Image (cartoon, rainbow, N blue to C red):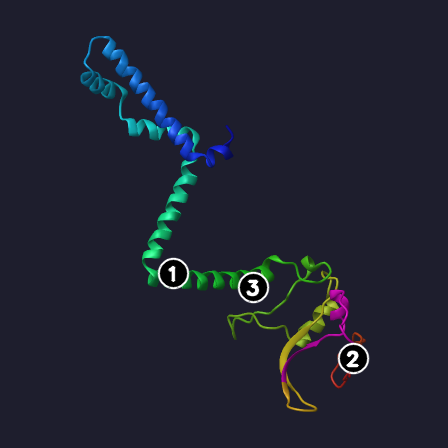
Amino acid sequence: MTWLSRLFSRRRLDFDLSAEMRAHLDEKVDALIASGMSREEANRTARREFGNVTLLAERSREVWRWPSFESLVADIRFAFRMLRKSPGFTAIAVLTLALGIGATTAIFSVVNAALFQALPYHNSNRLMFIREKLPKFSANPIGVSAPDIAVMARENRVFTGVAAFTTMQLNLSGSGTPERVSIARISANLFPLLDASPAVGRIFQDGEDQPGHFVT
């Protein structure tokens, strides 16, 4: 008998087990009657010698059933019965679970994108983000200043290249209502360093990232 047939034929197996145990008990009673006992005395003696029928049946079932799985199914059925009896509590429980699952999913999405998924750049595992820490002024790291970036780029002996960027928000005006947009100021070599191409237009040329130079 396969595990699948055992799983879906519980009632038949229970019936067969009960019938077999009754047959063994009846055989014992008949043997005691044949030895000279009355039926009533033979029944008492057979049951005493046979043991706890319910306990024996339960131990026999453990041989062919999945106790953990069946206990889980029983717990789920009991939980659903209790939830049906308390609709108010059920609504609160479902709402709490929905909020918890939603918050967990959102947090995991952020952590997964920030820590586990590779950045969409060539050799992203070799990228490093450098910041400065000035204990006398701030306990938190701060961005690297432009003069320090220039020194790093000029005296670099470790990295393939050194590029810089900073983000900010500006008002984009023209026709219609001005719009608040997020922008980034970058060094000319940032796109080549990331092996990336702009969606529209061209990349910056050397010297176009210097003060007084504007690209449109």
Residue type, numbered disc 2: Glu
SS assignment at label 2: loop
Side (left or right) of 11 relative to 164: left
The numbered disc on residue 93 is: 1
- Please rate how many residues cluster around mark 2, counting C-alpha atoms within 10 Å: few if below 14, some from 14 to 19, many from 20: few
Instruction: Classify the position of the C terminus by image quarter.
Output: bottom right
Q: Tell me which corner region of the image, top left, top right, bottom left or bottom right, holds residue 9.
A: top left
The tag on residue 110 is 3
Q: Residues within 10 Å of mark 3 (few under 14, many from 20)?
A: few
Q: Is residue 36 above or below residue 41?
A: above
Residue 182 lies in magenta, yes or no?
A: yes
Q: What is the distance, in whole Å, between disc 1 and disc 3 at their CAs?
A: 26 Å
Q: Earlier in the sequence, mark 1 or mark 2?
A: 1
Q: Residue at x 50, y 70 (%)?
A: 139
Q: Is the residue marked by circle 1 packed among few (<14), some (14-19), or many (20+) residues within 10 Å?
A: few
Choose the circle earlier in sequence order: 1 or 3. 1
Please report contact status of discs 1 and 3: CB closer than 8 Å, yes or no. no
Segment tinted magenta in the rendering: 180-200
Q: 144 or 91: nearer the eye?
A: 91
* Residue placed under numbered mark 2 in the picture: 208
The residue depicted at 68 percent of the width and 61 percent of the height is 127
Circles 1 and 2, Cβ within 8 Å, touching? The answer is no
Q: Quadrant of residue 150?
A: bottom right
